[in-house]
Amino acid sequence: MAIQAHPFLVSRNRSLDYRTVVAPSFLINEGISSVLARAAGGNLTLPGYAICREIQRTQLGDLTLIFHVIEANQKDIYPDKADEVLIDPFGREIVFIEGVVLKERPDKFVVTQELFDSIHERILNSYRSFWEDTNLFEASVVSVDHLDLNGNHQSGRILMLDEVEPFILRNKLNKQPATTEPKISDIVQPSVSKQLEMKDVLDFLRSLLSEKMTLLLLVGISGVVLLVLLIIKLSKLVFR
């Protein structure tokens, strides 16, 4: 019996921060697709590796994620563009956190580069739509057809699986994930959250700079007004 693997993607576009873009329909229907953006992430995955992580205590039971973190390429969006990393409006490199969700993890499971090639092909159209979305507040999560992990996807360039600590939801009634972040292995370290923190810092600095510029402008206008009044007063004294 073939194993059903459901593709997912976590990324960002020009206006929205990192979030779940593609998810299995069963997670969307349960309203917990956002857990993928919390459970999967990190720095770029080393060549020849993939990450394996369980999500435990969901209302659907335990789930298994197989994913990697790669740089998004301009050619993924614009085929005629140079082969360069896709960046956001602040000049930060955008990554794809792409992989599959397994409802049941088999005892013997081989992960290949060919599997990730198939995943990438399936999620690209959805990401292109997400990239062009100009909504500043939200975007719909979509699903794509699952993959049957038969011989076609389990033969080829075999990847090493790096197991990381499970991501545990609070309980089945609470759809919010646990606030305590589990430790990640040396192969993948949290980075998306650092980008979000940096964005907050940049926004704060911009607002601070804007306030200073406004203050300087007001001071300049006041100075001009005082200078005009002084000239008028001197003119009256001269021509008295």
Image (tube, grey):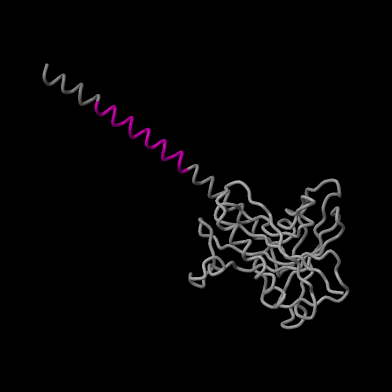
Residue farthest to the top, as pictured: 240
Residue at image coords 62%, 61%: 127
**Residue 95 in sight from this viewpoint:** yes
Residue farthest to the left, as pictured: 239
Q: Say if the magenta span includes residue 214.
A: yes
Magenta-tinted stretch: 209-228
Determine whether 43 is above or below 150 in the image.
above
Determine whether 221 is above or below 151 in the image.
above
Which of the pair 23/180 is nearer the observer?
Answer: 23
Quadrant of the frame with the C terminus: top left
Determine whether 133 is above or below 81 in the image.
above
Q: Is residue 127 left or right of residue 24?
A: left
Which of the pair 3/174 is nearer the observer?
Answer: 3
User: Residue 152 in the image: x percent, y percent?
Assistant: 75, 80
User: Residue 93 in the image: x percent, y percent?
Assistant: 56, 63
How many numbered badges does the structure rendering display?
0
Residue at image coords 86%, 66%: 104
Quadrant of the frame with the N terminus: bottom right
Residue at image coords 86%, 49%: 171
